[in-house]
Amino acid sequence: MEFVFHRGEYLLRNQATIYVDDRAHRFGDGFFESIRVANGKPQFLKNHFARIAETIKILKIQPSHFEYEQLTEEIEGLLKRNEIHEGGRMRITFYRKSKGFYLPKENDMDYFIEVEPIPHNHFELNETGKIIDIYTEVKKDPNRFANFKTLNAQLYIMASIFAEEKNWDDALIQNTKLAIIEATASNIFLVSNGVLYTPSLTDGCVGGTMRMNIINLALENKLKVYECTINPQNLLTADEVFLTNAIRGVEWAASYRTKPYQNNISKRFIQLLNDSLI
């Protein structure tokens, strides 16, 4: 049996319901957070909670009661009910729960927690490097919502379909100034001469928790890292390119067009991430 947590209750998945006037369903009025589970525990939860709190503020949602200890207890209860003792993938969908049209009648919040087991208890580097290239049909506007994982994911859906049609493993997203900012579900890092470069938040990438973890691990291990504007030409001069997200950790790219890449730094970060698991 698979349980979810919704509206303050643990329910079987097939018992959970979405109302017709649900604002997440009608307007995409909300956001989500993906959390990696290892050793049966949510990883980097304080970082995730900090981003949740920041997103709530930006979207002007005003939860009547929402605290770190409360969320931790609910997550641990869900993991126990689903008997997940090793690796897992968790998603929490937050939404404004009031009625109304574009203007909500109130700004209180509800959320939905779901989790599923995954085969690997720890982060594992992909054996075959990813083939990546640029999604050309739509650019992302680097506005004040660009750094947050809102429920409007149409750009990433279309970019994923585009990549599949081109037989790529992933597509890179550009902003309206043609800078490379991220992949369909990941942040991106370039390595040149042992130095890391990643798109600046001001260029419009999602402010990923794993992106932050990698930056912190780099600094702790005396690796230089710069947040800056990255252009397609930089992909052709990089020694290594890797993608990061909360669930998969680090994934190395094998090539961009005719440019091949190494994976030495990617391997190092996988080990550092696994060493930091609780």
Image: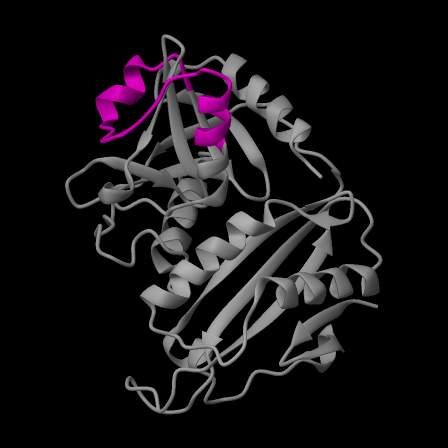
Question: Which quadrant is home to the C terminus?
Answer: top right
Classify residue 227 by image quadrant: top left
- How many badges with numbers are in the image? 0
Residue 263 versus residue 98: which sits nearer the camera?
Answer: 98
Position of residue 51 measured from the top left corner of the image (x, y, whole percent): 45, 54
Q: Is residue 127 visible?
A: no
Left or right position of 72 against 183: right
Identify which residue is drawn at 39% across, 61% down: 55
Residue 27 versus residue 63: which sits nearer the camera?
Answer: 63
Residue 246 versus residue 62: which sits nearer the camera?
Answer: 62
Identify which residue is drawn at 25% across, 50% down: 140
- Tell whether position 158 is magenta: no
Identify which residue is drawn at 84% across, 68% down: 1
Residue lying at the far top in this picture: please name it: 193
Q: Is residue 185 above or below residue 53?
A: above
Q: Is residue 82 above or below residue 203?
A: below
Position of residue 113 measured from the top left corner of the image (x, y, whole percent): 63, 67
Q: Is residue 235 above or below residue 262?
A: below
Q: Which residues are magenta?
A: 214-240
Left or right position of 101 against 9: left
Position of residue 10 measured from the top left corner of the image (x, y, whole percent): 74, 76
Classify residue 167 by image quadrant: top left
Q: Is residue 191 above or below residue 72?
A: above
Identify which residue is drawn at 15% across, 40% down: 177
Q: Is residue 275 visible?
A: yes
